[in-house]
Image (tube, grey):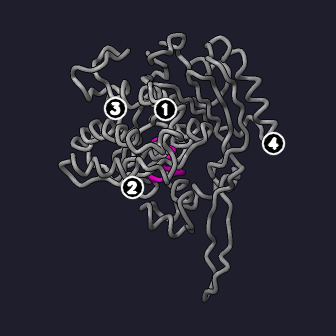
Amino acid sequence: MIATNSNKMKLYNQSLLLDCIRQGKHSRASLAATTGLTKAAVTIIVDNLIRQGIVNEIPSEEPTIGRPPIYLALNNKARFFLGINISRCGWSAGIIDLSGTELSSVLRQGYPTPRSFKADIASVVCELLAACGATADKIVGIGVTTPGPVDVKQRRILNPPNFDAWHNYPIGDVLDGIFDVPVYVENVSNAVALSEKYFGNARDCANYMTVLINEGIGSGIVIDGSIFRGHNELGHTSIYPYGKPCNCGNIGCLECYASIPALLEGTGFEDWNSASQDTETVLKEARYLSIAVTNACNLFRFEKIILSGSIQSPDDPILNTLASELSRRSMSDTPIIVAGKVTSDTLISATPAYDRFFTVL
């Protein structure tokens, strides 16, 4: 994407330069060549970032004729992001730095209520900051993830199944009243997809889908490097028209068959780790998933399908089995099937804020 030198696009250009520096070694000259900004504009923005302590200069140690280039690098401890994940099992919060390194985290187990969460969050953040030696003024964004659906623009949790206490809860506005930092609310499945883009197995592709498999099934779709904002609920697409009724109101939803609790029902297995050693169970899961994933692949051209959640081992036998099933069903080239790499709830939940810091808007 080509940048502009307009003063109105200052933040646009700054994000563009920061993302380039994040991705690799750059000098001022190479930043200008890569982005299309003038050398003068790059110098103004970079010098400002250096004054803020966000970027450091690193003299080249490579042998060269004449003046060696000065490279630029992020000062990873200059700014931080807070990640908050709220689930049906509890809530967690943690802090990451500019490199995506998790510095501290706290877990509160048990079904949370909005009241208990609001009462605890400020003290929890103080605890997190103390643990990593950071100060509140260095936090530049808060990411919040919850089960979907959520209203990203209004920063409101809508009506996730089995999450009644949080229905229509304005989590963004609530946190605005506690912290003076931008708050970004995201469906956890979309946040998983974003985290794989920055820190996981999607760093080398622009079009992919993550499938989050645990007590339910969620999905995140990335097209041309950005989250697809359509109504994205793979778990609530029907794979059997005369099947089980789903709590969403549909019939035969993928989640009724391929979520881990549904799959294990009546098998004697306690979790996916044990079930994945059984060939028949793996094949059953792969067939369920392949119906829904094939439908998605017939609508979008994905380079990768990334399985996350309970199914997240690079050696899991379902990867090859699902690839085989997709190859048999799909009209187009079969995408690469891989396990997700990002497992940290802190990293996943902080990624929406991290993304906004580095994304060209």
Mark 3 or 1: in front is 1
Is label 2 in a helix, a strand or a loop? loop
Q: Secondary structure at mark 4?
A: loop
From the image, state whether disc 4 or disc 1 is nearer to you.
Answer: 1
Q: CA distance from mark 2 to mark 1?
A: 25 Å
Residue 133's disc is 4
Q: Amino acid at mark 3?
A: Leu
Query: Upstream in the sequence, badge 4 or badge 1?
Result: 4
Q: Amino acid at mark 4?
A: Gly
Disc 1, SS: loop
Q: Nearer the viewer, residue 121 or 49?
A: 121
| Residue position marked by numbered label 2 in the rendering | 205
Image depth: mark 2 or mark 3 in front = 3
Q: Give the mark nearer the N terminus: 3 vs 4.
A: 4
**Is the residue marked by circle 1 packed among few (<14), some (14-19), or many (20+) residues within 10 Å?**
some
In the rendered structure, which segment of residues is drawn in magenta? 192-202
Marks 4/1 in contact by CB < 8 Å: the verdict is no
Quadrant housing residue 72: bottom right
Q: Compare marks 4 and 2 and give the one earlier in the sequence.
A: 4
Q: Position of residue 131 (x, y in %)?
A: 80, 38
